[in-house]
Amino acid sequence: MRLTIKKTAMVLAAFTIILTGIDATAQVKKGKTMKKKILFVVTSHDKKGSTGEPTGYYLSEVSHPWEVLHNAGYEIDFVSPKGGKAPVDGFNLEDAVNKKFWNNETYRYKVEHTLKPSEVKVNDYVAIHYAGGHGAMWDLADNTEIAAIASKIYEHNGAVSAVCHGPAGIVNIKLSNSKYLIEGKKVAGFTNEEEAAVKLEKVVPFLLEDKLKEHGAKYEKAGLWQEYAVTDERLVTGQNPQSAHAVGIALLKVLKSL
């Protein structure tokens, strides 16, 4: 009888270990799944001020970071201030990466059916990326809902990235200590000279370079249309459309270090 009880106890112990192992494996898998999602922010604004000229998110500033991160195994979701179909600018399908993104049925559907901020499950994401395009200057800077999402992702040890006019979305983000996210950090973004070069310096609601500096960023830049991306802690920013791929690479590097 004693032997039987001993054997039964051993079997139960072994079974418990197996169940514990299964549960641990499931938790690891769940953790990995959770860590493989990134939220891309795109504008809902489709006009350049009173000019009547169309704008939106700049396609390459979505597609080039998307390619880097998608190839690394990350799933991308999209959010915009209004949700639904996001207006697109810089629609150049001669760019092979743009074409690859646009012809991907899954991601074409996602960017044409963006989430509303209220639909975002913040804890699902390890990073948030702000794509540029002039539209961002009108509706991302003052969007408190998306700013709150970005702040939570960052303060949960996630990363924030932005390119070209995308940093308009991060100029007003404040952390729980009431300081601006960009305060004291190296940051790049569309320059005053580049805005003047496209003759929109008096059309945009503010100059991005000036606003970044005003809120305490250590603003850095290269020459006109030169690729330039900078990383400071878990914040990655790029100067212009030419910097989109570099921002994707830098963001991936940050994510690998988390």
Image (cartoon, grey):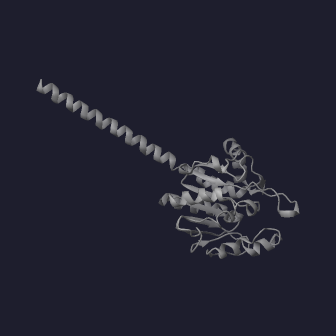
Q: Nearer the viewer, residue 116 or 193?
A: 116
Q: How many numbered badges does the structure rendering display?
A: 0
Residue 109 percent coordinates (x, y): 70, 43
Relative side of 181 to 95, left or right? left
Relative side of 94 to 38, left or right? right
Q: Quadrant of residue 170?
A: bottom right
Q: Nearer the viewer, residue 101 or 51?
A: 51
> Is 111 drawn above or below residue 190 in the view shown?
above
> Is 68 drawn above or below residue 221 in the view shown?
above
Residue in the picture at 67% in, 48% down: 116
Residue 68 percent coordinates (x, y): 60, 55
Residue in the picture at 57% in, 72% down: 185
Which residue of the protein is positioned furthest toward the left in this rendering? 2
Relative side of 241 to 156, left or right? right
Residue 74 percent coordinates (x, y): 56, 49
Which residue of the protein is positioned furthest toward the top in this rendering? 1
Residue in the picture at 60% in, 50% down: 70
Q: Quadrant of residue 193?
A: bottom right
Relative side of 143 to 148, left or right? right
Quarter of the figure with the N terminus? top left
Residue 162 percent coordinates (x, y): 64, 62
